[in-house]
Image (cartoon, coloured by chain):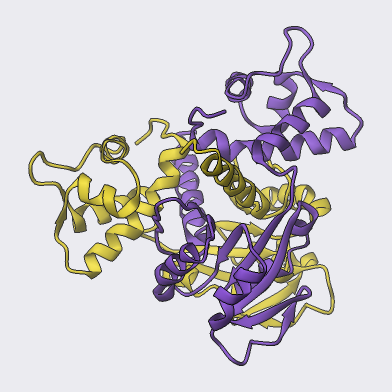
Chain colours: A yellow, B purple
């Protein structure tokens, strides 16, 4: 697993995971790459290629064992344990994320929201309290977190990211519309407008008949 | 442009676009792939390869013209025009998206929110009114939209997606934790937990020293 896996494959792994959870729930014990392909809209050869990156768990003429593959992908993604999360920025996006029940269901435990706005401090969203950003470092010292969600305004995002890195955060999920590049910190960009632009590109492709 | 461009490239185009807008704002007229590389955390050879997919606008020894490249990427992404958007589901995520100012700044005009919950109908979020889901088809007949944002619960998402497709929607931005595969409809998945899982994978990679 020390070899570098491409971004595109990493991005598809959660989709495989969700699909396998659904199959498990339906009582399906094994599945072929062809059937997975039909359900997911990914070609069967792409599926075989993706899963071979992690050792290839399929057997010729049998297909994949749903529960085994599900367990392996869970390990690979590292979601077989719990993660502590802090959310920086308690605006609309920060509030919505704090109230998103599926995070805690998947083992992501939101410890606190942080904001500079005194009017927000002390409020709770989804049971998570808003603390003042000045208390970030002392909070993290006593409640080490794995992941920071950055939902702060554009102008403050870079400085906050550097501050989080100095406080020991090694993973940032970035909703601010700026690129964050920090040595030794994993950054996943969740810029909302980027997703909408990618969709617009695909819509154009569809209208031009290219797909 | 009729050739198929890979998902990974499409996903990077909005990042190039944002970076070029920032450079334009700083008054930078031209930039080398090396300097873009430093600012974006993408290798220079990757940048040259990405941009060559669209004809390659760089000149040896000169670099890229910022305003020209920005304009071309704008055209390629199809964001040189306006798009009508409806949001299906007026819960926390739907509300936060309706209030996200950057969408309208980029030409995405949110026409209405839809929900089945009578208690939400009639409220406005970010100046956008919540209408009853029963009025979806008649609304779209009178206000054709390009894009639907699907922020509905998991159990209702697939049926709503099919309903949107029947009502003429050709692009769905899907926040529900189910895979949507519909013939002739562009779907961009924005499943929030997927992004967090991908980040967790990268964090593990970092901790194992693989990156």
Residue found farthest to the bottom: B119
Q: Give the residue at x 57% y 57%.
A: A147
In this rendering, position of residue A48 left or right of residue A4? left
Q: Give the residue at x 70% y 20%.
A: B33
Q: Is residue A50 shown above or below A170?
A: above
Residue found farthest to the front: B142
Residue A55: percent from left, percent from top: 24, 37
Residue found farthest to the top: B61
Rendered image quadrant of residue B132: bottom right
Residue B208: percent from left, percent from top: 43, 40
Q: Is residue B136 visible?
A: yes
* Front one among A127 and A32: A32
Rendered image quadrant of residue A28: bottom left
Q: Is residue B151 shown above or below A63?
A: below
* Front one among A137 and A200: A200
In this rendering, position of residue B189 left or right of residue A193? left
Q: Give the residue at x 76% y 57%.
A: B102
């Amino acid at each position: 697993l020390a070899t570098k896996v491409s971004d595109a494959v990493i991005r598809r792994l959660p989709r495989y995971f969700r699909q396998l959870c659904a199959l498990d729930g339906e009582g399906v014990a094994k599945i072929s790459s062809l059937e997975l392909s039909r359900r997911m809209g990914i070609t069967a050869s792409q599926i075989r290629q993706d899963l071979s990156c992690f050792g290839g768990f399929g057997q010729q003429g049998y297909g994949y064992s749903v529960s085994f593959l599900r367990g392996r992908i869970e390990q690979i993604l590292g979601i077989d344990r719990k993660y502590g999360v802090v959310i920086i920025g308690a605006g609309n996006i920060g509030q919505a994320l704090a109230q998103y029940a599926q995070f805690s269901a998947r083992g992501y435990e939101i410890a606190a929201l942080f904001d500079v706005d005194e009017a927000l401090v002390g409020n709770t969203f989804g049971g998570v309290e808003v603390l003042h950003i000045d208390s970030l470092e002392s909070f993290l010292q006593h409640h080490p977190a794995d992941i920071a969600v950055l939902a702060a305004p554009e102008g403050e995002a870079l400085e906050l990211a550097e501050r989080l890195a100095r406080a020991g955060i090694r993973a940032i999920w970035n909703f601010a519309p700026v690129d964050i590049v920090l040595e030794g910190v994993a950054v996943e960009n969740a810029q909302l407008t980027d997703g909408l632009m990618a969709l617009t590109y695909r819509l154009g492709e569809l209208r031009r008949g290219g797909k």
